[in-house]
Image (spheres, grey):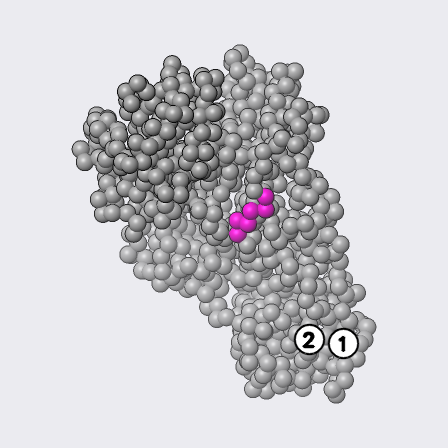
């Protein structure tokens, strides 16, 4: 078994909550991603087993949403927006800089397992501060290659902050979920913490 | 379409009264309430192009190919998912609709590889056909900039997927959802990256994969067995009945250069409902290969002589007549096969009983118990009308796989309770009470248990009907025709004789002096050493046999037979449906068909009134002799009077 007893019982809880077990697929996938950091194949099979579905149904949902990861990600996530506003303000150069600095293409993970970065994301909604990036789900605006280097350098020496853990707990509480919602590791709901490069 | 949830077959009578009138392209038509626009149009002969819609699947309206103008609705509506209403006005032929169709096709062809010349589907592809009929003549997108996906993805040992050719109509995923319930294929990822795939790319394990290429409207899912075998326009198509089991699935036999290349489904909603099992569908290869008997042979004194049919028949009659004169009919054993047609089986038992005074007749070697007409009162489609169906043991579905899909449909669409129990389950333990119609399905070796079960469940208001799964394509017909040791045609009472196994035992003990074997190679091969001993012991063995083997090697007279796909005649399926078969391949021998040879043999033995042995003539004769077959015709069920019912 890939999953911990706690995760299994949490998935059981979701299953009991909905009239259709299929409805519990999404929250179950979150449980697994919180525990393991990504969605390994045996874990998807295990979810299907608990919910009484075919594994293929779980995989169909998991692959539909781009925030579910199918392979282990680096300690820190870096997202570079290249949508219109950011592109006009030099995001392409920034992305090229990140690729050079980290030594892996967009979507890849550095060899030391520190960073997973991508530049094929939809607009981050921070056009006012273009070019914008997200590092561990925290926003940084008006980013230049120099600022980027500083952010990456600072992150490298630290473990990823549990960003969004609080907001996740708060929002799930609203929906009447158990208070013991797991702390988000990397891919929970982003908390919009705007940081001005001047703060650095 | 009659099998859609929107128009359940039981309410057809009701729907008859409830018709609504719609106007399509200026023409009025009255269709049952609840019909879909696409079906109403097709009843007028108006074609609306569809990809995602499928007559056996629920509508999803994802392909957007069938958009039409409906009344004053602000946007075009999908004809495949729009239910007709009274007074509805639909326009399918207008510049507006034509433009949308052109646009949809341009989108579908955007990344389509256009590898039609090497695509198995080329020539019978909806994408090709609609592109010609409704599509733009040219593309505005350069062919060099197509985005590519994986080709020739091996989904299993049977199916290959070309992800570039896929137009994402969801038919295959819905087939797995709705028809088999196995959900082996799903849509993976989204947007431009969406592909059809199995979980983690693991091989498909379904027993019904062969239906996938048939539901696929394009060349994305293809049969590995049929890959690069033929172009559709090279194929010669013959209507036939699947040879693999007794279920009687209607198939199209597609042959090229006198070799069968594939079996395709031929929708009969009463039987297989257009779904075939892989065992049947992929049993193609054995019919075009194997060693055949091509000339009549007489074997005497260690010498084998090739002779003409007339001489072979005369010699067979002489040898049989001699045994009859010296030892009587009791010293003769007659074994047929469930692969024979009704006409052959009826003539064979008649030859045995009337001409050879022989009651040792059988078509197989198992202990059959008390065979009766009662055991197939339940029709396949009738399963959906039952409240509860009891399936005894695992064998019924193992021996007739497509039955599984009918049971699934009955459960899913009609809420039928399906109880799978051990073959010897006690009726009381099932707790079935107060039902209107209960079905009992069992394999033929468990017919005694099924009879007990049916008797126990039947009561004042509960009608119990039975379906007995016979073995061999015409296992049911062989019984109806009286190719049985204890019953004659129509389960009539006759003087009892030895059954198949007893014949072989008596033959090896020397009590049976002559064997008349028609197509019995496959039957005898199953008996192993017993058959070999019997064949070695008996001197007079008259064999009508298509294939070389233990029978043809031992027989004193061999007359070449015809394989199942070289014959004309009829076969009867598990529910008593009498269905016609006609030759899909030219015969491998110049000898006449078995019915003719049997008539010649009877005449040579001095019998009269046998006619020419033409299969149609024999069919007329047997229909006159067996009441139930008179009413069945071609494609109908032979319905027997239940015991105690007035005639």
Q: Tell me what residue is drawn at x 45 percent, y 38 percent.
A: A104
Q: Tell me what residue is drawn at x 55 percent, y 69 percent.
A: B364
- Which residue in the protein does label 1 denote? B297
| Label 2 crowd (10 A; few <14 / some 14-19 / many >=20) | many
Q: Is residue B78 above or below residue B502?
A: above
Counting from the top left corner in percent of width and height, residue B501 is at: 53, 76
Left or right: where does residue B393 sit relative to residue B304? left
Please, what secondary structure does the residue beneath circle 2 have?
Answer: helix
| Camera-nearest residue between A29 and A120 | A120
Q: Are marks 1 and 2 in contact (CB under 8 Å)?
A: yes
| Label 1 crowd (10 A; few <14 / some 14-19 / many >=20) | many
Left or right: where does residue B516 sit relative to residue A56? right
Judging from the image, mark 2 belongs to the subunit labelled B
Q: Tell me what residue is drawn at x 54 percent, y 29 percent.
A: B63
Counting from the top left corner in percent of width and height, residue A126 is at: 37, 18
Q: Is residue B586 above or below residue B323?
A: above
The chief SS type of the magenta part is: loop
| Camera-nearest residue between A91 and B560 | A91
Counting from the top left corner in percent of width and height, residue B305 is at: 79, 80
Discs 1, 2: same chain = yes
Judging from the image, mark 1 belongs to the subunit labelled B
- Residue B554 seen: yes
Please, what secondary structure does the residue beneath circle 1 have?
Answer: strand
Which residue in the rendered view is the most extreme toward the front? A146
Q: Look at the image and give the residue range highlighted in magenta.
A: B151-156
Left or right: where does residue B322 sit relative to residue B67? right
Q: Tell me what residue is drawn at x 77 percent, y 65 percent.
A: B589
- Which residue in the protein does label 2 denote? B552
Left or right: where does residue B584 sit relative to residue B393? right
């Amino acid at each position: 078994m890939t999953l911990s007893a706690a995760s299994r019982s949490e998935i059981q809880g979701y299953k009991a909550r909905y009239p259709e077990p299929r409805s519990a697929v999404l929250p179950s996938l979150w449980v697994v991603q919180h525990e393991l950091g990504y969605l390994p194949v045996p874990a998807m099979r295990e979810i299907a087993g608990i919910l009484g579905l075919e594994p293929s149904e779980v995989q169909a949902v998991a692959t539909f949403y781009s925030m579910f990861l199918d392979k282990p990600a680096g300690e820190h996530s870096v997202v570079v927006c290249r949508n219109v506003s950011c592109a006009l303000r030099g995001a392409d150069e920034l992305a090229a800089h990140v690729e050079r600095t980290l030594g892996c293409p967009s979507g890849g993970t550095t060899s030391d397992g520190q960073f997973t970065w991508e530049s094929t994301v939809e607009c981050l909604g921070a056009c006012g501060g273009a070019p914008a990036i997200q590092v561990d789900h925290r926003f940084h605006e008006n980013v230049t290659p120099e600022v980027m280097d500083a952010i990456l350098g600072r992150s490298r020496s630290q473990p990823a902050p549990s960003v969004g853990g609080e907001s996740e707990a708060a929002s799930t509480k609203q929906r009447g979920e158990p208070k013991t919602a797991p702390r988000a590791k990397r891919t929970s709901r982003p908390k919009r913490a705007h940081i001005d490069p001047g703060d650095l | 379409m009659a099998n859609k949830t929107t128009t359940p077959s039981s309410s057809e009578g009701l729907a008859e009264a409830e018709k609504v009138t719609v106007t399509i392209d200026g023409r009025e038509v009255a269709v049952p309430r609840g019909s879909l626009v696409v079906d109403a149009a097709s009843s007028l002969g108006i074609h609306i192009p569809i990809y995602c819609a499928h007559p056996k699947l629920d509508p999803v309206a994802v392909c957007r190919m069938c958009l039409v103008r409906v009344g004053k609705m602000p946007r075009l509506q999908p004809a495949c998912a729009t239910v007709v209403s009274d007074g509805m006005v639909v326009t399918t032929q207008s510049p507006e609709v034509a433009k949308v169709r052109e646009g949809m096709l341009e989108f579908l062809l955007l990344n389509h590889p256009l590898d039609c010349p090497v695509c198995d589907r080329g020539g019978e592809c909806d994408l090709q056909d609609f592109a010609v009929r409704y599509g733009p003549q040219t593309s505005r997108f350069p062919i060099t900039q197509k985005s590519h996906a994986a080709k020739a993805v091996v989904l299993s040992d049977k199916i290959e997927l070309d992800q570039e050719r896929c137009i994402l109509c969801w038919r295959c995923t819905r087939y797995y959802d709705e028809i088999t319930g196995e959900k082996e294929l799903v849509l993976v990822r989204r947007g431009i990256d969406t592909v059809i795939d199995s979980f983690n790319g693991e091989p498909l394990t379904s027993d019904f994969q062969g239906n996938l290429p048939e539901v696929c409207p394009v060349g994305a899912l293809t049969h590995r067995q049929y890959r690069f075998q033929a172009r559709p326009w090279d194929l010669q198509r013959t209507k036939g009945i699947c040879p693999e089991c007794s279920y009687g699935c209607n198939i199209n036999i597609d042959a090229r250069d006198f070799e069968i290349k594939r079996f395709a489904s031929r929708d009969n909603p009463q039987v297989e409902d257009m779904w075939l099992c892989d065992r049947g569908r992929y049993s193609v290869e054995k019919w075009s290969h194997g060693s055949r008997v091509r000339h009549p042979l007489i074997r005497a004194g260690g010498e084998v002589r090739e002779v003409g049919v007339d001489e072979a028949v005369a010699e067979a009659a002489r040898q049989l007549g001699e045994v009859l004169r010296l030892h009587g009919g009791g010293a003769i054993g007659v074994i047929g096969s469930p692969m024979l047609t009704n006409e052959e089986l009826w003539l064979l038992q008649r030859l045995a009983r009337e001409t050879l005074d022989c009651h040792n007749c059988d078509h197989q070697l198992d202990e059959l118990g008390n065979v009766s007409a009662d055991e197939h009162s339940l029709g396949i489609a009738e399963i959906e009308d039952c409240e509860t169906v009891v399936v005894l043991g695992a064998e019924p579905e193992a021996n007739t796989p497509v039955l599984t899909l009918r049971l699934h449909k009955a459960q899913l669409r009609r809420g039928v309770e399906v109880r799978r129990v051990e073959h010897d389950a006690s009726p009381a333990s099932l707790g079935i009470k107060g039902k209107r119609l209960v079905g009992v399905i069992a394999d033929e070796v468990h017919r005694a248990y099924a009879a007990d079960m049916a008797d126990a469940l039947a009561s004042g208001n509960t009608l119990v009907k039975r379906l007995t799964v016979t073995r061999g394509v015409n296992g049911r017909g062989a019984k109806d025709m009286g190719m049985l040791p204890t019953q004659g045609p129509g389960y009539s009472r006759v003087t009892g004789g030895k059954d198949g196994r007893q014949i072989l035992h008596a033959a090896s003990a020397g009590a049976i002096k002559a064997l008349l074997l028609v197509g019995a190679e496959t039957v005898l091969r199953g008996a192993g050493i017993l058959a070999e001993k019997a064949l070695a012991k008996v001197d007079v063995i008259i064999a009508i046999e298509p294939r070389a083997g233990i029978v043809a090697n031992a027989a004193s007279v061999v007359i070449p037979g015809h394989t199942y796909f070289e014959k004309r005649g009829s076969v009867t399926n598990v529910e008593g449906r009498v269905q016609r078969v006609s030759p899909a391949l030219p015969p491998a021998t110049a000898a006449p068909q078995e019915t003719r040879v049997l008539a010649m043999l009877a005449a040579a033995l001095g019998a009269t009134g046998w006619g020419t042995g033409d299969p149609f003539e024999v069919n007329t004769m047997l229909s006159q002799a067996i009441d139930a077959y008179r009413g069945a015709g071609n494609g109908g069920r032979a319905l027997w009077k239940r015991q105690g019912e007035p005639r």
